[in-house]
Amino acid sequence: MNPETFSPKHFLWSFQDGVARVALNRPERKNPLTFESYAELRDMFRELVYVKEVKVVVFGSEGGNFCSGGDVHDIIGPLTKKNMSGLLDFTRMTGDLVKAMRTCPQPIIAAVDGVSVGAGAIISMASDIRYAAPETKTAFLFNRVGLAGCDMGACAILPRIIGHGRASEVLFFGRSFSAQEGLDWGFFNAVMPAEELEAHAMKMAAKLAAGPTFANGITKNQLNMEWSMSIDMAIEAEAQAQAICMQTKDFLRAYDAFAAKEKPAFEGD
């Protein structure tokens, strides 16, 4: 995958100065997902493991909305006609998108405007950092369509972000929460005017891209791994991870810059 020439069929892509921006692009339907866009997003995030030129990903909104979840006509309707094997293929494929987002070493920033529901809320949840516009409405609405809240890792990831009690309420009732509630709960890192959202996300992405990107990848990996570790195991894993980072040229650059009273110029190696 060459980030300069990559041209996906089912979502927008742009790349500049180490920052890739992706966004769903069906604004007339509030950017729903289809079977094809699910699969292409999954494959793209998997490939990013090997694309070192991409240092940060911004998952943006388009036309005033983030994502309205699975398309009612293109996904929900066909699902009602599938057998168990076909349904399991689908639910595993959608879960693989979250796995790919969590596994890729690049930090993912979600810039969430307007509607962010169902699988759209999951994509926001699976990102590393989330910024929202004030009118954003987020809903894990699976319960409202007769499904369990345990979709694409929601029962594992959401309680770790907003707490077990809040996650239980959101998943059992399928109710939406506002941007302010999301900020108060820790789901969103910041809320800002819609006209400033994209610029802020790109500014923070540029800051990450200019940082020690190898070390950032290690941080993301440890955040993932340590969910299932004891404290003793986590401390040992972090000792090994930090020792690896201490062998990087970026660590030496930081020391030399500090000694010279200069700002380090990181290169990700």
Image (tube, rainbow, N blue to C red):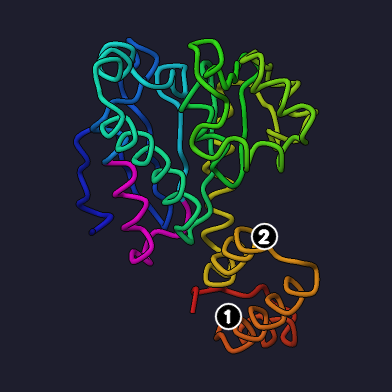
Label drawn at residue 221:
none
Q: Residue at x 67, y 57 (%)?
A: 227
Question: Of the residues shown, which amino acid type is indicated by label 1?
Answer: Asp
Q: Main secondary structure of the magenta part?
A: helix
- Residue that badge 2 annotates: 228
Magenta stretch holds residue 49: yes
Q: Position of residue 98 (x, y in %)?
A: 46, 44
Label drawn at residue 250:
1
Quarter of the image for residue 233 reads bottom right
Q: Position of residue 54 (x, y in %)?
A: 39, 59
Q: Position of residue 6 (x, y in %)?
A: 22, 49
For the N terminus, the quadrant is bottom left
Q: Residue at x 53, y 54 (%)?
A: 107
In terms of depth relative to the viewer, which is nearer, 12 or 150? 150
Residue extent of the magenta highlight: 40-56
Does dot 2 land on a helix, a strand or a loop?
helix
Density class for disc 1 (Cα within 10 Å; few <14, some 14-19, many ≥20) is: many
Q: Position of residue 172 (x, y in %)?
A: 66, 19
Q: Marks 2 and 1, how far apart in space?
A: 29 Å
